[in-house]
Amino acid sequence: MQKFTTHSGIAAPLRMMNVDTDIIIPKQFLRTIKRTGLGVHAFNDIRYNEDGSDKEDFVLNKEPYRQASILITGENFGCGSSREHAPWALADMGIRVVIAPSFADIFFNNSFKNGMLPIALPQEQVDQLMNEAEENPGTPIEIDLEKQTITRGNKFSFPFEIDPFRKHCLLNGLDDIGLTLQKGKEISTFEDQDKQKRSWLY
């Protein structure tokens, strides 16, 4: 998993509440178990017309938000079903950070496991970031995970909270497999001892 230390990027304001996982990646695109190739289908139903052309009023179809790597949105983001394809799709389209007043628990947890940083902020601060992204669309926002700050140039800086264990995993690029491999020596020792005790299993 890619490490997350600091990130600077364009923020796209998605003024929607209760964006569920079926909006993020509709069910017809869940046939794959690959984490790549889903980005083009992210937000499919609100992003494209029936003929496949872009909907001009969808924020991620506008410049410079097409290059956005930070998404600022409304409360309860990622609600609905527990599909892990939702963070896969966002990550594949280049989103590294999602900022919202609140998240659905399963989406929130899945994001960390896929190298994305979901940040919950008070509504007032989300509104300020949203307004700033609309009024100055090309100006990047910087996220510093080590310092736990969101900074917009010299205008303002907000602190954010994050669980220490999740922070450690992101800073070191550790997903569930990576965490297990950290215990590789202990696992090998156990296997060697177990082979001697229960050779019939091997």
Image (spheres, helix red, strand yellow):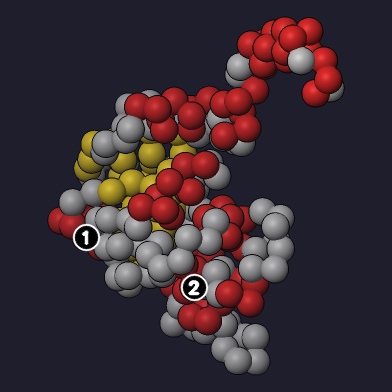
Q: Does 59 sit left or right of 189 as displayed? A: left
Quarter of the image that includes the N terminus: top right
Q: Does 97 sit left or right of 86 as displayed? A: left
Find residue 5 and report its horizontal and vertical position in percent.
Answer: 47, 30
Give the SS element for disc 2. Answer: helix
Residue receiving disc 2: 22
Residue receiving disc 1: 127
Q: Answer above or below: position of 7 versus 101.
A: above
Q: Does 199 sit left or right of 107 as displayed? A: right
Residue, x 64% and y 11% (percent of image)?
186
Disc number placed over residue 61 in the picture, else none? none
Determine the image quadrant of residue 162. Answer: top left
Residue, x 15% and y 56% (percent of image)?
124
Find residue 81 and report its horizontal and vertical position in percent.
Answer: 46, 66
Q: Earlier in the sequence, mark 2 or mark 1?
A: 2
Total residue callouts = 2
Q: Residues within 10 Å of mark 2 (few under 14, many from 20)?
A: many
Query: Can you name the residue that lies furthest to the left here?
Result: 124
